Image (cartoon, rainbow, N blue to C red):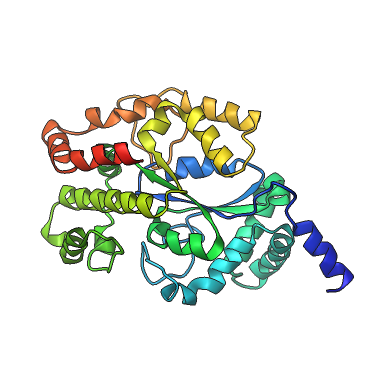
């Protein structure tokens, strides 16, 4: 190793007690992963990456399917690209990628890591210079999360939300379920009856509510299975987080070995006590400044009683199981 390489290695070496482990924030879609990811992303200690598994996101990996399930064998083909994202947690690598990304933007399309680094250098200067680890927020990485934890020694945060809250959000946004992408796939869940139901599901033959109920059940069951296999992971219930956002986020930061600064605390208080939207205001995909306590029961006003009753009839027991386990 020459002198320059030694200096670079020293600059990237963690100090005592400082974690460099990647952070993955994932979970059931519409369960608050973006909120939690953005709060973590406010820390100058992390380089925040938004949904690289999502083919509808502005900057994403080239993957053959949504909610791809990766293991040691299937993940090998995607390791080079994901390795580069994880490496953005190292300042020296990040600077090099940013410079190359800026140059390649003029000459052609830079690689994903280069694009993300160049963009962060332009718009997020403080965290760009100080970040020591990456935080990848992506619900579509849910079925790849164990592989990422094992491959990169990542810390994982998994989110779950009340089934009526998730379903009412989808319906308010007029979004289709993800079952069109998931149905027919070999989903890694131990519940073989549920896996068969998912594999045989035909979205065109079912209602939107049918699909959303099956989707929520799939993620709830998979989350409970993860809890048994990965007790060291951080599992968060969206509804509890909404009631006590500062208490839960302080605990998350402590478990991730991140500093929960006064600035982060103040911003969190401001964003979770803002006025709730009026009755006539449209539901927005990512609105993070609002009365968080009001979110917990918002589905009761959104859903017609027969719809709410069906959701609780078919998913209520599983929700109670999740509340007891997570």
Can you say which quadrant of the picture contains the N terminus?
Answer: bottom right
Residue 64 appears in which quarter of the rendering?
A: bottom left
In the image, is 76 to the left or to the right of 216? right
In the image, is 65 to the left or to the right of 309? right
Residue 298 appears in which quarter of the rendering?
A: top left
- Toward the viewer: 240 or 120? 240
Task: Residue at 32% x, 53% y: name it.
Answer: 225
In the rendered view, would you say 16 is above or below 188?
A: above
Can you say which quadrant of the picture contains the C terminus?
Answer: top left
The extreme right residue here reads: 3
Task: Residue at 64% x, 67% y: name it.
Answer: 105
Query: At which x and y percent is residue 306?
Result: 10, 35
In the rendered view, would you say 197 is above or below 262?
A: below
In the image, is 164 to the left or to the right of 33? left
Task: Residue at 43% x, 60% y: name it.
Answer: 146
Label tally:
0
Query: At which x and y percent is residue 16?
Result: 73, 48
Residue 309 appears in which quarter of the rendering?
A: top left
Query: At which x and y percent is residue 160?
Result: 35, 43
Task: Residue at 31% x, 54% y: name it.
Answer: 222
């Amino acid at each position: 190793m020459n002198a320059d390489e030694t200096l670079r290695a020293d600059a990237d070496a963690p100090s005592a007690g400082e974690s460099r482990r990647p952070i993955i924030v994932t979970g059931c879609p519409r369960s608050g992963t973006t909120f939690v990811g953005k709060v973590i992303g406010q820390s100058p200690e992390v380089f925040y990456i938004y949904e690289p598994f999502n083919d509808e996101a502005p900057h994403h990996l080239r993957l053959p399917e949504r909610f791809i399930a990766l293991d040691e064998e299937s993940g090998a083909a995607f390791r080079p690209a994901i390795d580069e994202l994880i490496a953005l947690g190292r300042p020296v690598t990040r600077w090099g990628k940013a410079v190359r990304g800026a140059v390649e933007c003029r000459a052609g399309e830079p690689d994903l890591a280069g694009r993300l680094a160049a963009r962060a250098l332009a718009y997020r200067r403080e965290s760009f210079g100080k970040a020591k680890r990456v935080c990848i927020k992506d619900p579509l990485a849910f079925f790849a999360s164990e592989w990422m934890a094992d491959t990169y020694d990542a810390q994982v945060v998994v989110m779950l939300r009340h089934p009526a809250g998730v379903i009412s959000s989808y319906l308010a946004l007029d979004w289709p379920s993800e079952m069109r992408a998931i149905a027919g796939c070999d989903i890694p869940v131990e519940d073989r009856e549920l896996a068969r139901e998912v594999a045989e599901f035909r979205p065109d033959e079912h209602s939107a509510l049918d699909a959303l109920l099956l989707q929520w059940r799939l993620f709830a069951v998979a989350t409970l299975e993860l809890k048994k296999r990965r007790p060291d992971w951080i599992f968060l219930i969206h509804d509890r987080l909404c009631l006590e956002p500062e208490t839960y986020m302080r605990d998350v930061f402590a478990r991730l070995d991140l500093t929960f600064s006064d600035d982060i605390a103040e911003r969190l208080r401001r964003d979770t006590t803002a006025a709730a939207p009026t009755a006539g205001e449209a539901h927005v995909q990512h609105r993070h400044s609002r009365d968080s306590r009001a979110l917990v029961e918002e589905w009761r006003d959104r859903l017609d009683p027969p719809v709410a009753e069906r959701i609780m009839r078919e998913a209520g027991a599983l929700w109670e199981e999740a509340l007891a386990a997570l």
